[in-house]
Amino acid sequence: MFVLVAGAAATLPTPAPHTRPQIRANKEAAHAARAAAAAARPLLIEMLNSSEMRQGLEKCCPHLASMSSEHLLDQIGHEIGAAELVHNFKSSPKANSTDQPHNFENLPLVEKLDWLPNLYQAQLLSGVPITDQQNIEDAAEVAIFGLPSFQQFPLSWTEAADRFPYVALNWAGVDAGNPGFGDVCVVFNNNAVQSSVQVAALDTGIWEMMCNHTSTNRSWEMPINCSVPLPVTGTFEHFEHALLASFGFWGNGTSPIQEALRFLSRGPLSGKPYLQAANISSDSMIRYLETDIIANVRFSQGVKFIVGTFGSLFGTDLGRQLQVWCASRGWALVWAFGPVGEGWDLPPSQMNKRMIDPSLSHLVNSTLSDKSVWEHQWLAAAHIRAHKKVISEQHIQEWWAVATRSQTHLAPITATACADHDRCIGTTVLSSHADCVCYHH
């Protein structure tokens, strides 16, 4: 299959699901991860056994305080394997900042493809050649993930296919996924992609900027302890070394134990219902494990569902486009209230509001769905957007309150919630008990 390059008559072939360099990098990473995780496991158990940790668990998560450290670490592993793998991108082709004049990965481009493009593929598909790629992503992809350096410029389509899209582990269950990177969130099918996942201890771009000084851009000032060595990447099965290093990196302002307690206090092991989740700040949201899928992920096998950010897309043409794209792929579309605003400098909020788009609710066993109320509010929002330059947080809250009143609201899936993780996209939160919401087929 071929895809058309924007602004040109040229076509480019759809890349292989896995290129030889990707296969080799994943094999080598899995081998190294096994030994690194084995060495880190007793250190994590020692941390979980400490009196400071046990006292902290009594305060944040009492149900975990009596659990043995070995069992608690096993539970963390089960939940890491079940947590959402998310990739966010901006729906609009328009750039919204002067430091990023182009937004190559966008909904009008991505909806034409059969796979999720990496940043190099998106640029080439937009008709813009890559003549010199000395950036932080390239540095990380070679040194951290084991992929070969680019051999020539302008960059070829073949070499671009060896790289990957960036993915985060949504341990905290943020409703919009990883919203600092965009208002459309792709949620992957974990079982379909797990053999290609490499787990890094933190966002590798931040590490390249803050610790490796690959970039002179110091706009991202983070409390990172760069004296912690960056370990080899992990896997879903062998992750302990990445998790231990993550606590060390982000424990700079407090301690690794306090960072571990923060990690446990918002997520599947917190013991709190999703609607009572603790507030999460931009500073905490960025502290995810980076779980990149080193592959050219096919939409047909690799994607489970899509999340759209309500505030930026509800009542818009791009919102309609998102609905049409999901319908064409047979994906459920979940709406997240998410953050009000863009970027990473946002006030703390719960970010725990999700609902199923009623126009696609027939794909799953959702119990509540009111298309007429939703559509009426959509048209009302579209009218307001057409006549106001600035949409306030109050507008968005009012639209959400009305449009979602008779819809199915969701929490992210957890390791123990549903029997079939391939088919299920979450659990209900407003019913008397948490029912699994799953595809019919």
Image (cartoon, rainbow, N blue to C red):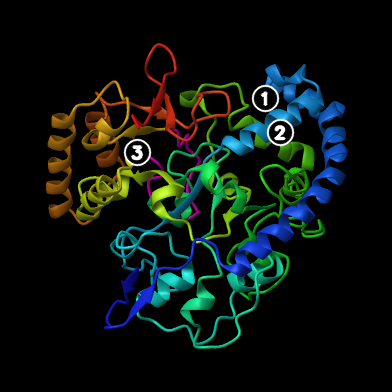
* Residues marked 2 and 3 touching at CB (< 8 Å): no
- Whether residue 344 appears in magenta in the rendering, the answer is yes
The amino acid type of the residue labelled 1 equals Cys
Question: What secondary structure is found at the residue carrying circle 3?
Answer: strand
Viewer-closest of 180 and 18? 18
Vertical comparison of 268 with 296: above or below: above
Name the residue that disc number 2 marks: 261
| Residue 304: % across, % down | 42, 42
Neighbor class of circle 3 (other Cα within 10 Å; few <14, some 14-19, many 20+) is: many
Neighbor class of circle 2 (other Cα within 10 Å; few <14, some 14-19, many 20+) is: many
Q: CA distance from mark 1 to mark 3?
A: 30 Å
Which quadrant of the view contains residue 369?
A: top left
Which quadrant of the view contains residue 311?
A: top left
| Residue 364: % across, % down | 32, 30
- Residue at image x 45%, y 33%? 352
Name the residue that disc number 1 marks: 60
Instruction: Judge depth for marks 1 and 3 and give the one in front.
Output: 3
- Residue at image x 58%, y 32%? 267
The amino acid type of the residue labelled 2 equals Leu
Name the residue that disc number 3 marks: 334
The segment highlighted magenta reads 337-352
